[in-house]
Image: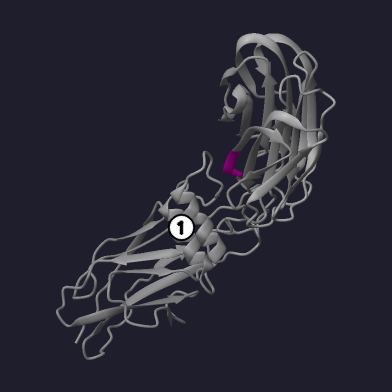
């Protein structure tokens, strides 16, 4: 038979720790959980960036398969001497995404132009983008960005264009004033010589044709503009556009990695991909789970299960010293001392259990029992461990 063991818990930094125990029950039981906090805006992240060119345009560029609900941004520059009147007539991809021009700038000194286009709420699995200018250009280039966590409707926030800038060793991408935190700002500059550096928070994503191709995810509303150095003073043109983060409000699950309104296997795949190829800025907003790491994947897996949640409670204990113990059961209730329901369908052979069905805003009371090889079950541990789940 299995005798009863008393377990007393105390709460410290979200971890319940055993103070004393006696008998042949598990001598310690710890219950730890990491909360998910609500955010007003998602944290956008760079998914992919692809160079295309130098090449003769029109041209079809190959890109990594796009995700669903993302933002695609195309930056294009004509070759020096290609004529400032040349513009992009259309951009299309094999996923059926619709591209719209955001900004355009020209440099009459170098007789060239730059343009920024974008497609919001992308369809999945587009793998090629066709860029068609109004006239053939023998040597031009494009950079294609993909971002997650950006608004799927009315994504464009602000734009700026700098035309025919005087010769300078410092190149400005133009300043935009963002409407909210976590805007994605994309800036491109075509220069007479070559860019040699860029100022924070911008990251130079490409050195294509020695020009500037940069982005930033800004931490607060305000004025932002990329600043490069030029290897030798020359004229230039630049274009910048900012895009709004998706508004997620208090009811949006942080475990919805692809921001499609549901937590499922697609989010698990997206979380795994974030671990395998971490972006410069992690797009997940799962508080306490670190950045794009295995902890995030575990949280998303728990949330994707039937009845799962982004607020799992993890229980761990030390094995009983009794040789007759066959396993353990874990029970949960919304009321201390009564109404306990068993959570596990089969005996727990190990010393850990994850309650993936805990819901935000609830307070749960957990108890454990030990079961011997004859099927005899001990009484509930006492007092129960208490887990208060944040909301949402």
Where disc 1 sits, the SS reads helix
Residue labelled with disc 1: 297
Residue 94 in view in this figure: yes
Residue 35 in view in this figure: no
Colour mode? one colour
Q: Residue at x 40, y 83 (%)?
A: 345
Q: Seen in the image, is 333 located left or right of residue 104?
A: left
Quarter of the figure that contains the C terminus: bottom right
The answer to whether 41 is drawn above or below residue 380 in the figure is above
* Number of numbered discs: 1
Q: Seen in the image, is 204 located left or right of residue 339?
A: right
Instruction: State whether the magenta stretch is mostly helix, strand or loop.
Output: strand
Q: Is residue 113 magenta?
A: no
Mark 1 Cα within 10 Å, few/some/many (few <14, many 20+)? many
Quarter of the figure that contains the N terminus: bottom left
The residue stretch that appears in magenta: 44-50
Quadrant of residue 245 in the image? top right
Q: Position of residue 102 (x, y in %)?
A: 79, 36
Q: Residue furthest right?
A: 85
Q: Residue at x 37, y 74 (%)?
A: 367
Q: Is residue 48 magenta?
A: yes
Q: Relative to the observer, which residue lies in front, 70 or 383? A: 70
Q: Relative to the observer, which residue lies in front, 288 or 214? A: 214
Q: Residue at x 40, y 72 (%)?
A: 366
Q: Position of residue 295 (x, y in %)?
A: 42, 54
Q: Position of residue 383 (x, y in %)?
A: 35, 71
Q: Position of residue 214 (x, y in %)?
A: 62, 30
The answer to whether 93 is drawn above or below residue 21 in the figure is above
């Amino acid at each position: 038979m299995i005798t009863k063991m008393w377990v007393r818990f105390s709460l410290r930094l979200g971890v319940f720790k055993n103070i004393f125990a006696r008998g042949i029950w598990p001598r310690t039981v710890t219950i730890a959980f990491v909360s998910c906090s609500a955010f007003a805006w998602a944290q956008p992240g760079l998914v992919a960036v692809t160079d295309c060119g130098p090449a003769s345009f029109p041209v079809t560029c190959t890109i990594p398969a796009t995700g669903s609900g993302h933002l695609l941004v195309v930056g294009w520059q004509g070759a020096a001497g290609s004529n400032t009147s040349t513009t992009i007539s259309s951009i299309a991809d094999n996923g059926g995404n619709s591209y719209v021009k955001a900004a355009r700038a020209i440099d009459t000194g170098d007789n060239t132009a730059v343009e920024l286009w974008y497609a919001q709420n992308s369809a999945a699995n587009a793998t090629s983008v066709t860029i068609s200018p109004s006239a053939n250009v023998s040597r031009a280039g494009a950079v294609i960005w993909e971002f997650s966590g950006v608004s799927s409707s009315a994504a464009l926030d602000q734009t700026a264009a700098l035309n025919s800038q005087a010769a300078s060793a410092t190149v400005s991408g133009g300043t935009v004033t963002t409407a909210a935190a976590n805007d994605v700002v994309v800036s491109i500059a075509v220069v007479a010589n070559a860019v040699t550096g860029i100022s924070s928070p911008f990251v130079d994503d490409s050195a294509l044709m020695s020009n500037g191709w940069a982005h930033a995810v800004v931490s607060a509303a305000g004025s932002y503009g990329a600043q490069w150095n030029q290897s030798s003073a020359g004229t230039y043109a630049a274009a910048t556009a900012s895009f709004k983060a998706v508004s997620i409000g208090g009811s949006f699950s942080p475990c919805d990695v692809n921001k499609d309104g549901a937590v499922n296997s697609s989010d698990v795949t997206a979380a795994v991909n974030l671990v395998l190829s971490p972006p410069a800025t992690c797009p997940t907003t799962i508080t306490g789970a670190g950045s794009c790491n295995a902890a995030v994947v575990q949280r998303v897996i728990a949330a994707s299960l039937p009845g799962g949640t982004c607020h799992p409670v993890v229980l761990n204990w030390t094995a009983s010293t009794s040789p007759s113990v066959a396993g353990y059961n874990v029970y949960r209730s919304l009321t201390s001392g009564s109404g306990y329901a068993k959570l596990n369908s089969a005996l727990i052979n190990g010393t850990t259990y994850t309650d993936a069905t805990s819901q935000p805003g609830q307070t749960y009371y957990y108890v454990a029992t030990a079961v011997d090889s004859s099927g005899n079950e001990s009484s509930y541990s006492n007092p129960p461990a208490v887990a208060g789940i944040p909301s949402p």
